Image (tube, rainbow, N blue to C red):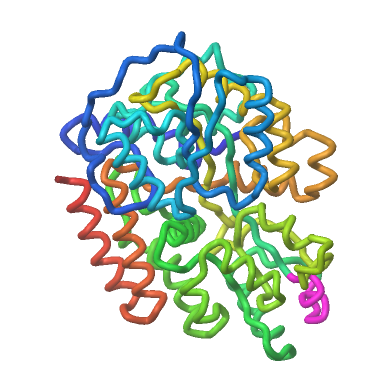
Amino acid sequence: MSSSNHGLGRRSVLAAGGLGASALGLAACGGSDDSSSGGSGGGASADFDEHGPITFATGKDTTGVLKDFLDRWNKDHSDEKVTLVELPESADDQRSQFINNAQAKSDAYTVLGLDVVWTAEFAANQWVVELPKDKLPIDDMIPATVETATYFDKLYAMPYATNGQLLFSRKDLLKDAGYDEPPATYDEMYEIIEKVMADQDGINGFGGQFAKYEGLTCQLTGVVKSAGGELFDNDGKPQADSDAAKLGLQTLRDGFDKKYIPKEALTYKEEESRQAFQDGKLVFLQNWPYVYDKFEADDGSSKVKDKVSVSLVPAVKGEGTSTVGGLNYAISAFAKNMGTALDFIAFMGAAEQQKAWFLQTGNPTAATAVYEDEDLKKKYPFLDTLKDSIDKGAVRPQVVKYGDVTQAIQEAAYGCLSGDTETDAALSDLQKQLTDLTEK
């Protein structure tokens, strides 16, 4: 995978700055807690000889199948059972609870399900322990995913899942409007929307994640990248008021102003936008690939079954760029029974579980082999497109005070998209805020 060429490869550069005077480092995701701005220390030393019951703390399981995987483990490990601790669905709330647990030095959480941009922050603060590479199937993982689990060349988590957003299109509506292919750019997409909406009553154009939460940071990061820029440069300096950033944000603002993006999209997170498309209310949707299974469900819940095509997300110019997502599994520095935790992580990273999770949930996993698997290719005919999306993906800002940074990005973007501020003013103010946050 080549996604290191699109931001992941800067990890060591920004990390070095983070431990120096510039205060720049590696990101977490969500929340406004700035407690990660320094190393709190106090992490327990890793004892992988200790075995016994453990807990697995991760975000709410919206798939409904995680329990089956844990049952499979527990059936064969009666003295080392895993108990699931479900955290909120919101990434912001998950991060806050993880940090609170770490600051209390609590052993309530053993294995942590961390967003890919949290791993290094937790490592820097000694909230998670270094993992032995020879005990985990790291060599079988996409190299870029391993980078997200690495801090100063040491492994602090095991990549479990990766992700790239895709564009889902109503191919039946496109055909009726005279289009054979999904749009490659926003200009093309807006043109199609205008024609479809003129011919169809009660349908809206484009849906994405535009509510004021982490998904909006993902949305802006990708659209700015596709406009030829980044919110932070390779040295970790904010570039929020660059011409590319202005072009990217204005492209989205134009969509709202011209009603190509419905006003209610300002309330959309992943599930709200998925439901709107699934109910036949949208021509286009940008979302993660898990939604595809729901669109193709046989139970009558989907009004778009057999009517959906899949492509790369639209570009402002050049190629469409998704923000990379995913999940890493780490072990709390304050946990007991780390030996069991390590074995459980290895179990979840094994090829059998990686394939099964992808097949059953539609959530892409980190193992390289799944992208060549015939069963997966049959179920997900867009697998090559997904791999392309991940390869070309953008990474959210990798900064120590990520909670404050993402909140500032969300406020600026939401204020502009909702019409409260204009693009230049919103990004000028954001540039000042980001500069203050990264220079203190």
Residue closest to the eye, 424 or 134: 134
Q: Quadrant of residue 16?
A: top left
> In the image, is residue 362 above or below residue 369?
below
Is 365 drawn above or below residue 310 in the view shown? above
* For residue 55, side relative to residue 352 (left or right): left
Asked which quadrant contains residue 346, the reply is top right
Which residue is at the front of the view, 237 or 272? Answer: 272
Above or below residue 44? Residue 175 is below
Q: Position of residue 96 (x, y in %)?
A: 33, 47
User: Quick one: which residue is furthest to the top in this view?
Assistant: 49
- In the image, 417 versus 336, the foreground residue is 336
As drawn, the residue found furthest toward the front would be 78
* Residue visible at 71% across and 67% down in the picture: 169
347 to 232, vertically: above or below: above
Is residue 323 something that shows in the picture? yes
Q: Is 51 on the left-hand or right-hand side of 14?
A: right
Residue range highlighted in magenta: 170-179
Magenta residues: mostly which secondary structure?
helix
**Quadrant, the C terminus:** top left
Horizontal and vertical percent position of residue 1: 61, 34
Image coords of residue 12 (percent x, y): 36, 29
Q: What residue do we see at 40% from left, 78% from top?
A: 418
Residue 390 appears at what percent x and percent y? Answer: 60, 44
Taking the spot 58% from the left edge, 63% from the top edge, the residue there is 271
